[in-house]
Amino acid sequence: MKKLNPPLCIILLIIAALSFANCGTSSDPSLTDIYLPDFSRNWVNNVNSEDEFFFLDVPADQPTGSFTGNEFISGTQVATLAGTFDHSKVTFVLTFLDNSPSKTYTGTMTGTTNRVLTLSSSGQNLVLKQQ
């Protein structure tokens, strides 16, 4: 039986280790983000339970798409919203009915039974919880 060359064995082990080190990773985030968002029901601002968001025209059971919606504070509509989602990533523009400057929010949705949208706009955070 022929003896293996120790330097050759070391090189082969290094190649094998490097091959497995990147297994399952990708530079394309859409390949690793398999989250299926659910915009159903109403959503409440974490710091103000009177501030409610309703997402409309959202394609059900789809990983990507667009939507519209409304924001109500104490039962009065204060804004409309339009946006897109790509798996867990969500972006929408909030357009206020009083002609205040609009705000673009970006963030992520997490959770399965208790979903949370964590968003920000120019350093201002907005956390919405699905009801």
Image (tube, rainbow, N blue to C red):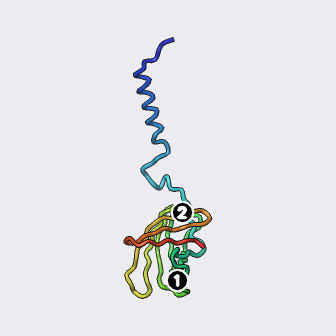
Residue 55 image point, x, y percent: 54, 75
Amino acid type of the residue that numbered disc 2 sits on in the rendered structure: Thr
Amino acid type of the residue that numbered disc 1 sits on in the rendered structure: Phe
Task: From this view, report whether residue 121 is shown above or below residue 26.
Answer: below
Task: From this view, report whether residue 63 is shown above or below residue 50.
Answer: above
In the picture as drawn, the residue positioned furthest to the top comes out as 1
Residues 62 and 97: in front is: 97
Residue 61 image point, x, y percent: 59, 64
Image quadrant assignment for residue 129: bottom right
What residue do we see at 48% from left, 67% from top? 118
What residue do we see at 47% from left, 67% from top? 90
Tell me the number on the disc at residue 72: 1
SS for tag 1? Answer: strand
Residue 100 image point, x, y percent: 39, 84
Task: From this view, report whether residue 7 is shown above or below residue 98.
Answer: above
Q: Residues within 10 Å of mark 1 (few under 14, many from 20)?
A: some
Residues 114 and 34: in front is: 114
Q: Residues within 10 Å of mark 2 (few under 14, many from 20)?
A: some
